[in-house]
Amino acid sequence: MRHFRWMTGGESHGPRLTAIVEGLPAGLPLLAEHVDVDLGRRQRGYGRGARMKIEQDRVAFTAGVRGGETLGSPLVMQVENRDWANWTTRMQAEPFDPAGELPEPLIRPRPGHADLAGGLKYDRADMRDILERASARETAARTAVGAVAKRLLAAVGIEIGSHVVRIGDVAANVDPSLDAAELFARARASDLACVDDVAAEAMRSAIREAAHAGDTLGGVFEVRALGVPAGLGSHVHWDRKLDGRLAHALVSIQAIKAVEIGDGIAAGSARGSQVHDEIGYDQAGKRFVRPSNRAGGLEGGISNGSEIVCRAVMKPIATLKKPLQSVDVTTKEPLAAAFERSDVCAVSAAAVVGEAMVAIVLADALLEKFGGDSLKELLRNVAGYRAQIEAY
């Protein structure tokens, strides 16, 4: 990220999460409610755990906004952890009193989690020092950053939404005639972000069965971005290719193990004539068009003017009520893995985080292409480029 720079800080049971964003132009209208709506969506979803009943995520701007508009300086946001009150003595910044009761260390790493790998890397015998940061609680801060990025993208006519296409072995049947606005609205009205009501009920049954078995479920979600102009990203260098940047961002989300752009997986078993999108020209609209979008809106690392379509595969959550086999890292004796309060399924929440990450990448690519220290300057640059495309 060169132009939209951001960083998050904070632990799962620490006092708060913090996010810093740099690169926003001055004059972008921004209110806490613009962020809070996505923070609330991230907390909802069938299969979520007890932690979401404790937290009521709200953002507080502590720098970079005045009078409801960005200043062009770094934006600082904070989200309080209400559960901190229950963890104060275990997560305090001050040294623990050796004469008092010390926090119980986590010494039984969970398979599929960062516990052991992080403990080895950072030489931490108590793996709580790892799991607190590795926790998906961090995605609340990402969601806040993504909500700000969405505000910037919306100013130039770009909209982002998502929906769940699979949980476990239950796949949604999505009507291809659904326009994006209806798709997004129906997904947001569903407690599983699924637009297929029949599949959603089967998904709920699968989640209940997994919960009763002390197990967890993963799935697949899709993120779409509408109104993205052709020309974001670049074919020139590997690290400027927009598809690579999107894949990197999505797979960086906790528990995401694979990413597909357009018909990426199916394309590997089809012929070229069945994969590539033919090109036409709309004389009235003065724009190039494609009757299909198997490329997912990206060709050669550059947006081509079609919808950007990405899918991400989320593995089942690593914390199980009926834990898998592990080892006590102090005695090296075999023991069941530790159990931390967790979700059974969080694919619908991950979809909101996926929206955030796609928005962050597109905001960076937008500023890379058009620049602008103020929103007015950015909008002039975008308008000039669109006129250039119409005259091509």
Image (cartoon, rainbow, N blue to C red):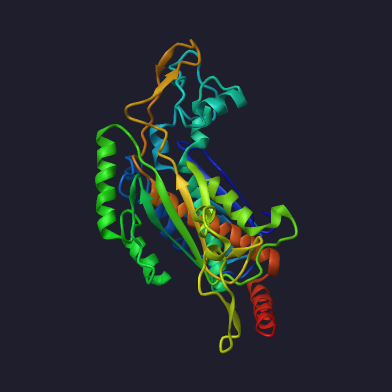
Residue 179 drawn above or below residue 57: below
Does residue 373 show up?
Answer: no
The image position of residue 250, as x and y in percent, is 54, 50
The image position of residue 163, as x and y in percent, is 40, 58
Does residue 320 show up?
Answer: yes
Relative placement, left or right, of 31 versus 319 is right
- The answer to which of 278 and 147 lies nearer the viewer is 278
- The answer to which of 251 and 36 lies nearer the viewer is 251
Residue 17 drawn above or below residue 90: below
The image position of residue 359, as x and y in percent, is 55, 60
The answer to which quarter of the image holds residue 184 is bottom left
Residue 128 drawn above or below residue 360: above
Relative placement, left or right, of 260 versus 47 is right
Q: Quadrant of the N terminus?
A: bottom right
Residue at image point 69% right, 67% down: 369
Q: Quadrant of the C terminus?
A: bottom right
The answer to which quarter of the image holds residue 304 is bottom right
